Amino acid sequence: MAFLAAAGEKVEFHEPSWLAVIVAGALAIIGAIYVLVSARAMYLAPDALSQLNMVGPAVGVGMPLLIAANLVYSWSIEGFVLGHWIRAIVAIFALLIMSAVGSYAMGRALHATHWDHTVPLSGGQRPKEPR
């Protein structure tokens, strides 16, 4: 096994520059804040449709920022690697496509169940109708 490991391509690692660390950290913090705020908004949303709408900022902005932060940090350590860039682009496009498909499917499921949007999710009672 030592012979096979030694035959592999040697990857050179460098210390990341302070600028790359600051950029990657800022992207990661902003992305994490988007995900956290979206999760909190989903928790506080009054109904299922509103919760479904809160997924957009987390998946559409927060997660791509986290992927970009990882890409910037890996470039600062290993230099430009085409494979990392392609993987990041594919991951971001996959997130955006799956977000759209998932939102469509969940919206159709809510519509197909004849969901009553006036009933709160907390198990409360439906508002009384005027006579």
Image: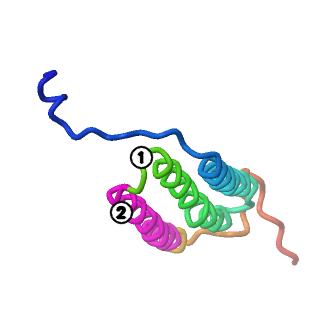
Residue shown at 63%/68% (left/top)? 53
The x, y position of residue 125, in whole percent, is: 78, 57
**Which quadrant of the view contains residue 27?**
bottom right
Mark 1, mark 2: which one is toward the viewer? 1
The amino acid type of the residue labelled 1 equals Glu
The amino acid type of the residue labelled 2 equals Ile
How busy is the neighbourhood of tag 1: few (under 14 within 10 Å), some, or many (20 plus)? some
Can you identify the residue that label 1 sits on?
78
For the record, the magenta segment spans: 81-108
Q: Nearer the viewer, residue 68 or 9?
A: 9
Relative placement, left or right, of 75 versus 43 is left
The x, y position of residue 9, in whole percent, is: 22, 40
Residue 77 colored in magenta in the image: no
Color encoding of the figure: rainbow
Q: Nearer the viewer, residue 130 or 98?
A: 98
Q: Secondary structure at mark 1?
A: helix
* Quadrant (top left/top right/bottom left/bottom right) for the C terminus: bottom right
How busy is the neighbourhood of tag 2: few (under 14 within 10 Å), some, or many (20 plus)? few
Q: Secondary structure at mark 2?
A: helix
